[in-house]
Each structure stands twice: as structure tokens, then as C-alpha cells.
Image: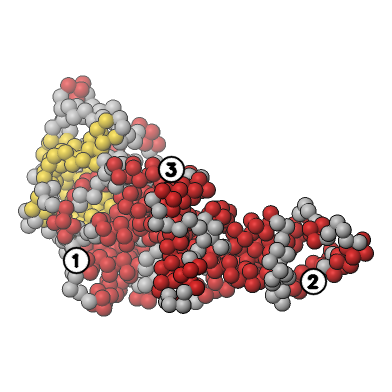
Amino acid sequence: MTLLEVENLSIAYQTRGGVSLAVDAASFSLEKGKSLGIVGESGCGKTTIGMGLLRLLPENGIIQDGKVLFEGQDLLQISEDEMRTIRWKKISMIFQAAMNAWNPVQRVGEQIVEAIRIHYPDYSRDRAVKEVEDLYQLVDIPRNRLFNYPHEYSGGMKQRAIIAMALTCHPDLIIADEPTTALDVIVQDQIIQKIKEIQKELSIAVIFISHDIGMVAEVCHDIMVMYKGKIVEVGKREEVFVTPMHPYTKSLLSSYLTLDGVFDFEDKANETVCQPDTIIDSHICGYIQHCQEADSSCLREAPRWQEITPTHKALCRLCK
Amino acid sequence: MTLRRLILRRSLEILVIFFLILSGLFFLFHLAPGDPVSRMVDPSMSPEDAELLVSQLGLDQPLWLRYLYYLKNFCTGDFGISFHYGRPVVEVIGERLPNTILLFTTSIILSALAGISWGKLVAWYKGKRVDTVVTITSLVCHTLFLPWIALLFIWVFAYKIGGFPLNGMISPELWSDPASGWFVKALDILHHMLLPLLTLSIIHVGEYLLIMRSSMLETLSEDYILTARAKGLSEKRIRNRHAGPNASLPVVTNVGLSLAFSINGGALTETVFTWPGIGRELIFAVSNNDYPLALASFLFISIVVLVANLVVDVLYAYLDPRIRY
């Protein structure tokens, strides 16, 4: 059953230099209890999509067009008050920088209890605390640390506590935006395993936003690759990871360390980070400057979606 | 527990600082121009009598011995006799200091509360007309010259419009009337206090508001505000529970800092409104070479500032758990 269906979502930022399109007509869907990974480099619009779903864009962010159907309801059409009841109760988030995601002057437990009691006003404080204690057990934090201040937690604990908080209201969807950035590799792995485990156990749908395609491949059922605000390839994990079709996905995969440890510097050097303020010309392929496979026809014609299998497609004229 | 340790540590530091102030003042007064003897000695006095007076005052003793006497006198609470009043200095200060503390703590608390709550709101409506108007007004208030605004208030409210007393702290006829109860007396003090209070507060509220506004704007861009939004909290709750308390920390720091500076402003305000406080007494004592009174005034003002700073420190530690160490 489809939980989330995004149609033609376009989000732009109002900047001094004019309006810059950050997400260009993105469409995708997510089944209940499944996980979707959004991969791409910095500035490609993946976080913007995540924030856009919850309508938490910065002040200068404008949702220009599109539909976000969550359980059949268009989240872009409802009032702010209605949206507040969706936030956290239906869709929660695991934040990019757990270090700063906690209010430094309030006890961690208080902040989680607050999230519960906002959405369930009839819960007593004790009942809310009891629930948080159970969640702490789930994410392996000792109960006696519940009412510590954030600065008394380690980085990994803060991140696990965020996961606990994301689960408080039993949401249907969790948006995990770079949940492991700024953590060391071992803790990263623990967090990923935890999310994977919880996702399976509670069958919560997860949108995983990351620049690390390897990590996403480990956790997600489906992978979506973004480049310069556009979705360029969608498919099942195996399809995208094993048989990438879009040239960008290929170079993204090849830029990762392989087992023999050879890093393809030449290929990497060809890659320039896409500037957020780059004006996206929606007529020709955005990747054309860096594409190794592009030919003259790419300069003339717009890229088209090519279906490789019913579940796997790429936005490129050349892949078949 | 940690809070208690912080109080203990700060108190010890304050004792050390106070000892330094105590000693510093002694030597500063020793260096000050003007001779206390010349004020007391009559030109018609015989040299022998003058010398006797000097030795009675202990001024013929070496400096180090006088310093030790000074410390001993301080410890026994003996601050000498005021030249002008001919009464023990402690008595004079005991009458004046509470008046100053009343005026000051009220104005500081009022302006800090007003600055914090208005600054919070104004930051929330950044860029709107209310923000522009309030910010510019605060800037103007902050830069106002205090004696000028004090005189202006007297002229407008006490003289032109009327209804406010020109000076003083109490109406003598009301206080000498045995029929008036404590409530009437308190109202009378409040009535007299309103204009000086307004003057002091106007100067400070602008400062606190501007600090709060910019601090609030900074706080609003923090990640935990985004967390609060994502949690589905109402805007009001985000403002008052999450952004407000964090943003008010710099204001608390500034209250501590401005305390010391507000003493001069306070002295001016007290002088203009003839408020019988210690600031006015200090100016009077200095200009009249009333050494014991001036010295003791300085000491007590520094005690007040030190204690107020301790309170601010503790308040800060209470508000921000990160600095309790």
C-alpha cells in the first residue's frame, strides 16, 4: 500500500541573485514499511526534499508546484495547524547534526516527553516517561541517563536519543537526514544497524537521505539518485547498485573506495560539486559537462526517462 | 550540588576581589589631591594645635601602620565619623544605601524583563514595521544622555503636567502624620520613585532589548529550533520555551556588566531627582572632601556590585546547565 506519493514537487529558494530552483519536478512514491534512499552530492536538493515534505523549509524556501500525498492527503494543501498534527505523530525526523538538534539548556528526557505530550495531551507525565524509558532500552541508552543534559551525552548517544525521540509517537514515516554525519565509523555502523533493525521490527517507512551510496545500499529497499535538483535514476537497491544506468550514478559508484584500495582520482577530479545557485536549464541534461558518454544529440534534445525494468528507470537519453 | 559549589567558589573569589578593592581604595585616597587636615585646620590655629590634631587623626604615623589600622577598623565595622554630618559614617550609609538598592534593583529587574520579552517578540517579527519602529526607538533610548532625559522628565511630568513630585523620596507632611498607614507610605515612595525609575529604565531597556533581539535572531537559526518545529510544537511554545530562555542568556551577562556602569548613571539620576541614595552621597562627599564618607560609600557600592554579580552568576548557572562546573 502506498504511504507517500510525491508528484512533480518543485522547490525553489528566493536568493539575492534571483529564484534558484533546488528541486525540479521530483516524483516518487514509497510503500508502507519500506525504505527509500535519496543519494546525491551536497547541494543537489536531497535535504530540501526532506524538509519540503514536512513543510519545514527555511523562510526563503518556496514550494512552487506539486503534490505530496501522504495517506491520500495532500500535505501542501492543509493548514499549518493541521500540518502540526502530522509532524512527529505521522512523520518524524532524525536530524543531520544530532549535536545541535537538542536544546542545550533542557534535559534530554524533558524534550522527548514534550514531543509525546504535545501529541497526546491526555497522557500523564509518568506514562510519557515510562514510554521514553522503553524507547531508551530499544536504542541501548541506560535509563538513568534519561534526565541528563545534552552536553552530558556522547555524540553517539545524542544520535541514538534522537532516534528514540523520532519513534515516540509511532510515526508511519521517518525522514533520516544524514543521520551519521559527524560520527566516527564504528558509531556510524551502530546507528545504521539500529535504524535498520527498528525499521524492520516496527515496519516504519524510512526515507534515508545521504551522500554515501554504500551506506544507503545497505539499508534501503529503493534508491533514488539526485543531481542538480533532478532525480536522475530510481530503482531497487540491487538494480541501481549493481547495474547503474545513468552516467552520474556510475561515476558516483566508481568514486568510492574499492576493495583493492585504488581511488580513481582522475574520475574524481572531473567531478565538480554542483553549485546551489547554478541556474538549472531544464531543457538539456544537467550532467552534460561532466558526462563521459554524452554525444552531440545530448546538446540538442532533452533527457528522457528510460525504463530499464518496471522498477528501474533513469533520466538519460543514452542508457537502454 | 554543583550549584552550591559554584556559589562557594564565587564567594571566595569575591572575598579576594573585595580585599583588593579595600586596599586599592586606601592607597588611592592616600594619593588623592587635597589634604584632609587643611580642611579641618583653621588658619587661626596655632601650629602646635594643628600638629596635635594631625596626631589625633593618626596622620603622623607611617603609611603601613595606617594601612593596618585601616584594615583593623574595617574588620570591627568602624568607618569613622563623617566630617560633614558629624555622625558615624555607618549610620549615614545605612540610611542611604537601602534607597539606592530599592531604586536600582527595581529598575534593573524591570528593564531586563521588559527588554527580554519585547526583544523576543520583535525578533519574531523581524523585518515587519513593529520591528523597525521598536529597534530604532531602542537605539535612540540607549544613546540618550541620562541627565538630559532626567531633566526633561522633571520638566514635563513634574512641572508642566504636574502630578509628580519634583524631588525627594517622601512627602514629609504625610510621614509626620501619625494617621497614615504603611500602605499610604509605600504608595508615597512609589509616587516619588516613578520618575527616576522611568529614567533609569528607559536607558537600560533599549540596551537589553537590542541584545535580546540579536541573540534571539541567532537562536532562531539554531538546529534545535528546527527540531522543535519538526516536533509539531506551536510557534508560541517554540518562542517561549525553546528560543526565549536560550536567547536571554547574553542579556543576563549584560545585566551583570551594566551594574557597575549604572552606578555613575545612578549617581546622576539620584542627584537630579535628589533621591537620598548613596550615589548622590558619594558625589557630595567627594566634592566636600568628606574622606571617611567617600571611602565608605565606595566600599559599600563595591559590595553591592559584587553581590549583584554573584546573583547574576548564579542565575546564569541556573539558566544554563553547561556552565555549572
Residue A281 pos. (x, y %): 21, 28
Residue A8 vs B268, above or below: the answer is above
Whether labels 2 and 3 share one chain: yes
The residue nearer to you, when weighing A228 against A39, is A228
Q: Judge left or right: residue B20 versus residue A202.
A: right
The residue nearer to you, when weighing A164 against B98, is B98
Using the rendered view, name the quadrant where residue B36 is placed: bottom right
Element class at badge 3: helix
Element class at badge 2: helix
Q: CA distance from mark 1 to mark 2?
A: 70 Å
In contact (CB < 8 Å): disc 3 and disc 1: no
Q: Which mark is residue A119?
A: 1
Q: CA distance from mark 3 to mark 1?
A: 45 Å
Chain at numbered mark 2: B
Q: Judge left or right: residue B5 versus residue B161.
A: right
Whether labels 3 and 1 share one chain: no
Q: Nearer the viewer, mark 1 or mark 2?
A: 2
Chain at numbered mark 1: A
Q: Amino acid at mark 1?
A: His
Residue indicated by mark 2: B69
Residue B3 pos. (x, y %): 50, 72
Q: CA distance from mark 2 to mark 3?
A: 49 Å
Residue at left offset 16%, top offset 38%: A64
Q: Which mark is residue B140?
A: 3
Residue at left offset 57%, top offset 73%: B8
Residue at left offset 76%, top offset 74%: B72
Q: Amino acid at mark 3?
A: Val
Residue A135 pos. (x, y %): 27, 71
The residue nearer to you, when weighing B79 against A314, is B79
Residue extending furthest right? B48
Using the rendered view, name the quadrant where residue A41 is placed: top left
